């Protein structure tokens, strides 16, 4: 066996074992490890990584010494080892979990406020484009990114990816035109894949990207399935699907920044039934030892988010419903965190979902946030080479990202607990209690009053600030008693923050 002797807490131990490369190791062999220490006992299933190498991965949840045993179908007897989990490095707060019922926190207790973005297949673009994406993410606009394991076929996405998840060859697209691409998205024309043999290099590359995101403090919200496909990946047979789900979970689950997004637009995957999705959920729940966050994204029809395996609601706006104004109602309906991961994109392409303005994007974020939920960013500006952030990454061109970073800063200054909706335009932090610190936020949106008056419930001193959410300024208006008069500039997109000292 080969493995590290020291791994930081919430880092990843990887144990490698040489084994047979003949036959089909993906289906004919298995490997797993059992890890014990500090009251923690975890069984982790491994995977075949090609060239006769099998791997088992483990994320230690505590500091100190761990012991483990590895067993495999090709081993005569289990082999034992041990390692030490050291203190986490700076910036390592552990995996994100649900906290305070409607919110999120890292394992060490630090609050996590998701301000995410979508770049569906950024990691399957050229190396140059990937580096540009990571450089933009390094600016701190976003702390979560949604992206796919499978390549994507859709408008502005007609070229081939840098790699494929299976051994085989894709159909020849050299003679296809833009007009007949729709036909190829519905049927498998000329693809030759072995759905029982993975391409480990494809998955290794995704893992490299997960680690790069981890180093930037960005959560990897991995979309496991989607319908935008000309290669046949969305129409595999049930046993092929199950093999894929096991492989993905066994490879990725030991990375602390992984989330499971079961699908992008699950209701457009016509070949999959509710029974299929529930079976996938069972695979994930039973094989992910760390119980990473899990959800499933819709096009028109919501999945049943009340299912126990769903940890939070991942919602796309519905055509006939204003999405952000429904946040608090969805929160009460499902009693879980709400993330509207797709509330349209800032951009100027023809489809209505890809042509909202920067101010409208920022307004929807603030409105969602004040209603006790969270929102997701996307960008779709016309580009001479059809490089759109929403799918390819690259460079951002819109006005919203720096203003969403400003919102993140506002959220991260809150006391512990996240926001709860107080009605109309008001939210309070969860820790609002008599005699305790309280933060109240009012978001005025498109309203432009010149003055607001407040009479606070509790006696005490209150710091009052006026926040310009578009110009990213904070005006300190001083300290008040229970009766407060706030002067406003009469502009749109203002907010008022009142903090009891």
Image (cartoon, rainbow, N blue to C red):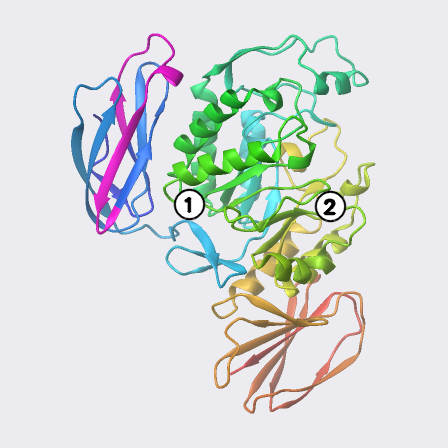
Figure quadrant of residue 247? top left
- The mark found on residue 264 in the picture is none
Residue 385 image point, x, y percent: 72, 26
Q: Earlier in the sequence, mark 2 or mark 1?
A: 1
Report the residue marked by disc 1: 291
In this rendering, position of residue 494 left or right of residue 144 = right
What residue is rendered at 68% in x and 36% in y?
267
Report the residue marked by disc 2: 344
Helix, strand or loop at disc 2?
Answer: loop
The N terminus sits in image quarter: top left
In this rendering, position of residue 41 left or right of residue 394 = left
What residue is rendered at 40% in x and 38% in y?
286
Q: Nearer the viewer, residue 294 or 135?
A: 294
Q: Is residue 141 visible?
A: no
Q: Can residue 30 be found in the magenta stretch?
A: yes
Q: Residues within 10 Å of mark 1 (few under 14, many from 20)?
A: some
Figure quadrant of residue 403? bottom right
Q: Is residue 37 visible?
A: yes
Q: Up-down: is 180 above or below 397?
A: above
Q: Nearer the viewer, residue 493 or 177?
A: 177
């Amino acid at each position: 066996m080969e493995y590290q002797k020291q791994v930081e807490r919430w880092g990843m131990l990887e144990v490698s074992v040489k084994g047979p490369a003949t036959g089909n190791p993906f289906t004919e062999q298995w490997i797993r490890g059992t890890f014990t220490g500090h009251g923690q006992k975890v069984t982790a299933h491994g995977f075949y990584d090609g060239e006769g190498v099998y791997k088992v991965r483990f994320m230690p949840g505590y500091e100190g010494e761990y012991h483990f045993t590895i067993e495999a179908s090709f081993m005569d007897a289990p082999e034992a080892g041990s390692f030490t989990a050291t203190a986490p490095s700076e910036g390592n707060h552990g995996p994100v979990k649900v906290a305070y019922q409607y919110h999120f926190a890292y394992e060490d207790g630090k609050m996590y406020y998701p301000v995410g973005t979508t770049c569906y297949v950024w990691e399957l673009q050229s190396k140059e484009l990937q580096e540009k994406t990571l450089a933009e993410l390094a600016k701190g606009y976003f702390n979560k990114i949604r992206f796919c394991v499978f390549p994507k076929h859709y408008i502005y996405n007609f070229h081939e990816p840098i790699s494929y998840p299976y051994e085989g060859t894709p159909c020849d697209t050299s003679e296809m035109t833009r007009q007949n691409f729709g036909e190829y998205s519905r049927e498998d024309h000329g693809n030759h894949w072995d759905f029982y043999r993975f391409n480990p290099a494809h998955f290794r590359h995704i893992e490299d990207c997960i680690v790069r995101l981890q180093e930037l403090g960005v959560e990897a919200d991995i979309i496991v399935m989607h319908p935008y496909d000309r290669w046949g990946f969305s129409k595999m047979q049930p046993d092929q699907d199950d093999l894929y789900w096991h492989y993905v979970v066994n490879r990725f689950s030991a990375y602390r920044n992984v989330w499971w997004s079961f699908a992008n637009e699950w209701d457009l995957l016509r070949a999959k039934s509710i029974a299929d999705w529930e079976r996938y959920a069972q695979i994930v729940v039973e094989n992910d030892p760390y119980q990473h966050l899990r959800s499933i994204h819709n096009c028109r029809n919501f999945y049943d988010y009340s299912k126990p395996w769903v940890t939070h609601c991942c919602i796309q706006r519905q055509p006939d419903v204003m999405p952000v104004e429904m946040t608090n109602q969805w929160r009460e309906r499902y009693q879980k965190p709400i993330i509207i991961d797709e509330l349209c994109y800032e951009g100027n392409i023809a489809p209505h979902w890809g042509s909202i303005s920067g101010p409208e994007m920022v307004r929807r974020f603030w409105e969602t946030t004040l209603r006790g939920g969270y929102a997701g960013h996307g960008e779709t500006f016309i580009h001479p080479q059809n490089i759109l952030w929403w799918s390819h990454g690259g460079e951002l061109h819109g006005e919203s990202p720096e203003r969403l970073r400003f919102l993140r800063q506002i959220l991260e200054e809150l006391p512990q607990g996240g926001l709860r909706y107080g009605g109309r335009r008001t939210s309070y932090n969860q820790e609002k209690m008599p005699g305790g610190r309280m933060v109240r936020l009012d978001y005025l949106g498109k309203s432009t009053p010149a003055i607001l008056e407040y009479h606070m419930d509790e006696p005490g001193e209150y710091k009052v600030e006026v926040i310009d959410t578009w110009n990213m300024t904070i005006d300190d208006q001083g300290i008040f008693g229970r009766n407060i008069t706030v002067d406003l500039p009469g502009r749109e997109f203002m907010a008022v923050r009142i903090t009891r000292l």
